[in-house]
Image (cartoon, grey):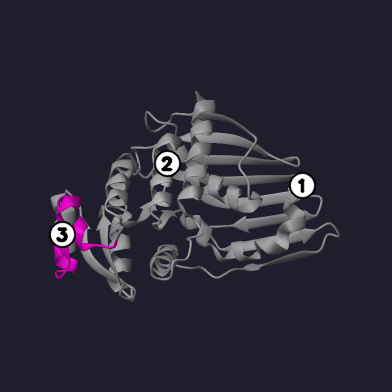
Amino acid sequence: MSQKVKVAVIGCGHLGKWHVDKAYHHDNCELIAVVDPHFHSQAMVKEKYPEVEVFHTLEECIDNIDAAIIATPTSFHFAICEQLLAAGKHIFCEKPMTQTGAEAQSLLKKALENNLVFQVGHSERCHNIWSQKKDWSTYLEKDCLVQIRRIAAFKGRATDVGVVRDLMIHDVDILLQLFGEVPLKVEAKGLKVMTSAWDHVEACLEFSHNRRAFITASRSHAYEKRDVEICSKAGTIAIDLMNTSFYQSDKTGKVISGQYEKRDHLLVEQDEFYRCILTGEKPQVDAQVGTEVVLILDQILKALG
């Protein structure tokens, strides 16, 4: 394979248009095509990127690409991924990987059988602050409490899924990253406020060694907040993901605080995707991780009733 990966972006809506721009300007990507059935999206691409071909369906360009970025509504992910895997194409799929754990497990099996890169777009992994996780071992090893809040006003998007798959999914992935294991027990309660799906959900996830996490995810709030707080006998770590700031205290009472570098998360993810295809490396958030997250979402939704 050449040093440029031939890519199609599938879906050019709210998030897809940003993926198109990153792919178009990326040194390791040759943007072959954009696939979107909506005429207004097609017109936007043709005007802004006149040399990029635009298609109604994936079938029209699948033979000409090495890989695809999927930024469609979640309900289309499974069928598109199946088609791409059957054709031997590498995949970057925006979160959630699929609507159900059973669908995700099916795709994981096929990706492993065909030795293909399958990356899932859990962009909150890209915060620079997580590089310090190795220094937090005493805060996370046992007897700790994690509280995560991801709340925002209703924006009228992602209405094909509830707040669990739209927002809480990020924080489930953060917990997998922090603890390195799936929860032993899941409980949840919620409200349907703005849509017919769950719009405000509070979940409790219990892990081994007396570690517990409380997550609040809401898209019906009056203000926006995204933060993580880890409390244990070692002290407290508080992270403001919106303002890229943190503070950390230890059991002596000493407090340090600061800012961490803000990054372009989509660019970081695309960098990794093309590098993994070209070098054979494994992405940080692969189909295995994506499947684990979706299976936990299934448990949360089941607990909601």
For the residues bearing labels 3 and 1, Cβ distance under 8 angstroms: no
Picture coordinates of residue 121, whole percent (x, y): 42, 54
Select label 2 or label 1 by which is in front: 2
Q: What's the mark number on residue 54?
A: 3
Residue 223 in view here: no
Q: Amino acid at mark 2?
A: Ala
Q: Secondary structure at mark 1?
A: loop
Q: Is residue 194 above or below residue 19?
A: above
Give the residue drawn at x 78%, y 44%. 143
* Horizontal arrangement in the rendering, residue 60 relative to residue 216 (left or right): left
Badge 2 marks a residue whose secondary structure is helix
Q: Read off the magenta span.
A: 46-66
Q: Which residue was labeled with disc 1?
A: 142
Image quarter for residue 246? bottom right
Is residue 141 toward the left or the right of residue 124 in the image? right
Secondary structure under badge 3? Answer: strand
